[in-house]
Image (spheres, rainbow, N blue to C red):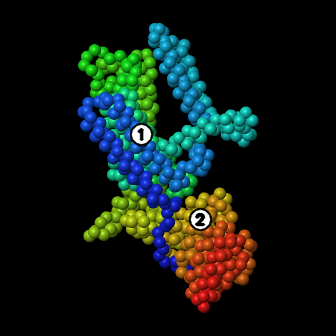
């Protein structure tokens, strides 16, 4: 078959169905929730500029707060269900099982060990026996050494044991612990898709994201200050949950980012969130809010259970005193390498925990040591990774940038000139060679204005050759393990060249992918590309092959399985031939006639019969 120019085509379709009405519902619910929370803050301040509203008012405000937040979360949850991100039923699809049950048990064991040590220390301190002997210190050293040995040898042992199969006991144990992972995975997914999105985490506009996030966290802190105990704990808990949800969504995005740099696929099952937002700043700001939410929580807890803390004589204790107390505890935490204990520096705060209160303080220290420090280290590691990535890219070792750096770097290649976008030629000349397939994707008008730079780079590097992309398509289609995303990526690159289609290659690829359910969408995209091309004998033959499993080339009859296995793909080919048939093309009419009598899908046969009936009426 000869090649035919396809001309300009429309921009690529969205990767997944859009539910605009549902998106609006979630947006309006979040906006209304933020407004309601702001009004509640005004109501609280109007009642009294001092904390501790009357219990009846506090109870009502806390109930309205919970209801408003519940509406926003429910709307985002519904949106996630309609978008295929969360299951409508507990055992439905998609199933989230990204957290391993064994990991949960290991974490539970570690937490239990730490809690046990805290309980032992508290009990020993009450009777004056809380001390660490040198023998116990030796046990700690050897115990940690054994833990490190196990962590080092576990992968090697798994490689040795796995080929021989697991015993019945091991398989039963794995099955028994799996529900723990599934439950935590489900909770994690709800935090990411329902709670975080209810706080605006999925909004593309950064100002809208910050406004929605601030519209939830700031009122939570304000209401936690004004409401009397225990009702003030309700908004404080809400602020905690939102902060954790934002951090979890950020973690998911960073996982997607790392996976993309490994396989260069923007779409597919491996991408769970996508790259519309970089939530690093939002996550760090959410964690920053905990520096105020934690003292508020301690203050509220003390009001409910005053026996947890002893207060020295003086003026009535205020929120500022709790911030000071929490600050002295922070000074002893891991980020400051526990300098206060080493140099025996004691805090002078008026607040002193009792025996049980020490457990509360210990929990806040764990929160600081594990959560805050982990977030800070992750942010620093991301900055270092970005710097190293740019270094390798400038050196020519990498030919792609990650999804967050890429738009920023391409934006430097264009500038406004007289109200229109133009190229910054010196910057373009200095830009390293970029991956040709990705440049073809960025050439789509939906990426304007950086599409101008992508087109210019393709011309500069001679990476806009459709023949080269057809060769890559064949290579990816005939790999033993086929990747639908990789195939669709090359199809999009071919489409964006605006060059000639090699119909032999496309038909060969479709036949190779036929019958593979994972490749259904790839075949649909291939046939849409053929359908959008100008009419020609080779185009007709390719569409006929998809509909009937028959090729006119050399008059050969191909095997019946060559007919595309899904009706939706054949429908694309039928509708493309319909326009030709209406124009009087006899070959197209003949193919439609055969579809009307032989296609296995009744709906498609009826559609073909309708086309023939319209032709007869027109004749």
Percent x, y for residue 132? 49, 14
Residue 161 located left or right of residue 271: right
Position of the N terminus, as image quadrant, is: bottom right
Q: Nearer the viewer, residue 498 or 368?
A: 368
Residue 66 located left or right of residue 104: left
**On the image, which quarter does residue 275 sit in?**
bottom left
Callout 2: helix, strand or loop? helix
User: Which of the two labelled residues, at mark 2 and mark 1, occupies the earlier sequence position?
Assistant: 1
Mark 1, residue position: 66
Residue ranking furthest to the bottom: 619
Q: Nearer the viewer, residue 443 or 106?
A: 106
Position of the C terminus, as image quadrant, is: bottom right
**Is residue 278 in view from this perspective?**
no
Percent x, y for residue 483? 60, 59
Please determine whether, in this image, residue 431 is positioned above or below residue 615: above
Residue 100 located left or right of residue 161: left
Mark 2, residue position: 522
**On the image, which quarter does residue 239 sit in?**
top left
Distance Cα–Cα, label 2 vs label 1: 45 Å
Percent x, y for residue 88? 56, 49
Percent x, y for residue 221? 34, 36
**Is residue 36 in view from this perspective?**
yes
Residue 530: mark: none
Please determine whether, in this image, residue 165 is positioned above or below residue 582: above
Residue ranking furthest to the top: 128
Q: Residue at x 40, y 19 (%)?
A: 308
Callout 1: helix, strand or loop? helix
């Amino acid at each position: 078959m000869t090649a035919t120019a396809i001309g300009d085509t429309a921009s690529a379709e969205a990767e997944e169905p859009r539910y605009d009405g549902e998106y609006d519902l979630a947006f309006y619910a979040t906006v209304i929730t933020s407004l309601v929370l702001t009004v509640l803050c005004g109501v609280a301040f109007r009642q009294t500029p001092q904390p501790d509203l009357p219990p009846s008012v506090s109870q009502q405000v806390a109930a309205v707060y919970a209801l408003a937040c519940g509406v926003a979360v429910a709307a985002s949850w519904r949106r996630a269900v309609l978008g295929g991100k969360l299951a409508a039923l507990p055992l439905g699809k998609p199933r989230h099982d990204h957290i391993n049950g064994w990991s949960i048990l290991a974490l539970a064991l570690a937490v239990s060990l730490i809690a046990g040590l805290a309980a032992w220390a508290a009990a020993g301190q009450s009777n004056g026996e809380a001390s660490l002997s040198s023998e116990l210190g030796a046990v700690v050293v050897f115990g940690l050494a054994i833990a490190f040995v196990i962590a080092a040898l576990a992968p090697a042992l798994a490689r040795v044991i796995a080929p021989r199969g697991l015993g019945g006991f091991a398989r039963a144990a794995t099955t028994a612990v799996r529900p723990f992972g599934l439950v935590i995975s489900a909770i994690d997914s709800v935090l990411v898709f329902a709670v975080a999105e209810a706080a605006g985490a999925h909004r593309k506009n950064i100002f809208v994201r910050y406004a929605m996030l601030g519209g939830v966290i700031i009122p939570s802190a304000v209401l936690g200050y004004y409401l009397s105990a225990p009702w003030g704990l309700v908004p404080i808990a809400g602020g905690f949950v939102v902060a954790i949800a934002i951090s979890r969504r950020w973690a998911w995005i960073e996982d997607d980012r790392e996976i993309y740099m490994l396989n260069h696929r923007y779409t597919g099952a491996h991408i769970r969130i996508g790259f519309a937002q970089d939530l690093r700043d939002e996550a760090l700001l959410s964690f920053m809010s905990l520096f105020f939410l934690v003292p508020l929580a301690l203050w509220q807890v003390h009001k409910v259970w005053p026996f947890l803390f002893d207060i020295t004589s003086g003026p009535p204790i205020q929120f500022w005193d709790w911030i000071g107390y929490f600050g002295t505890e922070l000074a002893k935490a891991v980020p400051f390498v526990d300098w206060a204990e080493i140099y025996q520096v004691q805090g002078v705060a008026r607040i002193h925990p009792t025996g049980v209160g020490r457990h509360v303080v210990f929990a806040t220290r764990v929160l600081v040591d594990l959560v805050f420090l982990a977030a800070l280290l992750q942010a620093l590691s991301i900055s270092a990774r970005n710097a190293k990535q740019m270094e390798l890219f400038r050196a020519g070792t990498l030919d792609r940038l990650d999804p967050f750096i890429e738009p920023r770097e391409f934006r430097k290649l264009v500038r406004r000139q007289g109200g229109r976008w133009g190229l910054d030629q010196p910057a373009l000349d200095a830009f390293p060679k970029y991956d040709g397939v990705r440049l073809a994707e960025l050439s789509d008008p939906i990426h304007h204005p950086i599409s101008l730079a992508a087109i210019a780079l393709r011309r500069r590097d001679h990476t806009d050759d459709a023949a080269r992309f057809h060769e890559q398509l064949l290579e990816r289609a005939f790999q033993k393990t086929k990747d639908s995303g990789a195939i669709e990526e090359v199809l999009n690159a071919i489409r964006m060249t605006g060059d000639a289609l090699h119909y032999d290659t496309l038909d060969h690829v479709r036949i190779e992918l036929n019958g593979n359910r994972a490749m259904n969408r790839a075949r649909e995209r291939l046939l849409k590309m053929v359908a959008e091309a100008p009419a020609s004998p080779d185009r007709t033959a390719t569409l006929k092959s998809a509909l009937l499993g028959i090729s006119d080339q050399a008059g050969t009859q191909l095997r019946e399985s060559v007919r595309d296995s899904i009706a939706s793909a054949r429908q694309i080919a039928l509708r493309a031939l319909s326009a030709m048939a209406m124009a009087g093309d006899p070959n197209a009419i003949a193919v439609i006639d055969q579809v009307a009598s032989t296609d296995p899908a009744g709906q498609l046969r009826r559609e073909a019969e309708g086309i023939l009936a319209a032709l007869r009426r027109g004749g």
